[in-house]
Amino acid sequence: MTDFNRDSVIKPGNFGTFYAADTRRGEFDRFNEALLMEGVRPDALFIGDSLMHYWELAAHFSDKGKVVINRGIGGDISTAVHRRFEADALQLKPRLIVMCIGANDLGWDILALTEAAMDTVCENVAAMVDMANDAGIPIAIGSLPPMWRPFWHTAEFTTKKIGMLVDTNKRLKPIVEDRGAIWIDHHSALVDENGEMRHELADDGVHPTAAGYAIMARVLKETLATAGITALGYRERLYLPINCP
């Protein structure tokens, strides 16, 4: 156990009545305190919205004794992740941060699909990459994945949001790479010839199935290996996945 002062643990507090980030705040504060008290430094930390939250990381990253932790929150937005980034990522001093955020900023109503929403995502992601760089922590940013029409949305909404996901990725990629961070192109690996999420990879049109996450893990590991990032232990060879759709 390392020297530890509970008063030094960063806790961002609750955000407000309707913030998804509040749903796991108490849980993450306790988890973070335990890691800091025991002096455990994660090899990789995943943070973002439901795309991270629902990823069973142990299924893909538990070999070679790596410590991989998840700080994803379903429904989260980039402004909230920016606010909790120091607490849930930087103070834990992981050897690598993997982040994907922004789909919820674009909204789930056609009136929310605006240029201003894309601006917010880009500004927050840029700020967090800068924060990671200042802390000397490598960071990999995942592209926003495609989607197909969930049963609760109109065709008009779905078509517009699919286009905005693509446009946001086009704006984010140079922002990430110009700052020396790693761009993870999950979108290309999950999309079909119509520009939609491959239907067999997301039962609800949005969240990947186990096969979808297997593909995302492969893309992440291959990209990290190419960049020489060893936090997940894949520098010597590319990850060879099981056969999946």
Image: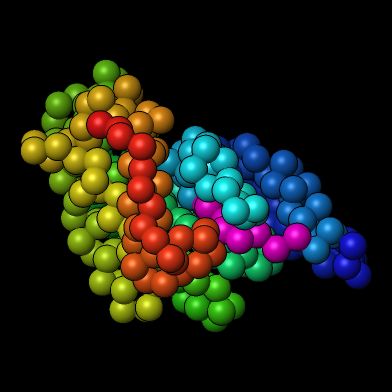
Name the quarter where the N terminus is drawn. bottom right
Q: Residue furthest front?
A: 236
Q: Which residues are magenta?
A: 40-47
Residue lying furthest left in this view? 193
- In the displayed structure, would residue 90 be above or below residue 45? below
Residue 115 vertical position relative to residue 31 in the rendered view, above or below: below
Q: Residue at position x 24%, y 41% from top?
A: 190
Question: Could you say where residue 185 lies in the image, as x and y percent from the top left?
Answer: 28, 55
Left or right: where 195 falls relative to 17? left
Q: Is residue 19 left or right of residue 194?
A: right
Name which residue lies at 33% across and 52% down. Answer: 219
Q: What colour scheme does the image use?
A: rainbow
- Reply above or below: 13 against 89: above
Q: Position of residue 71 (x, y in %)?
A: 59, 48
Q: Is residue 87 above or below residue 147?
A: below
Residue 143, image quadrant:
bottom left
Q: Nearer the viewer, residue 159 or 223?
A: 223
- Regarding residue 41, the answer to whether it shows in the image is yes
Q: Nearer the viewer, residue 23 or 56?
A: 56
Q: Residue at x 52, y 59 (%)?
A: 232
Instruction: Give residue 20's quadrant in the image.
Output: top right
Q: Quadrant of the C terminus?
A: top left
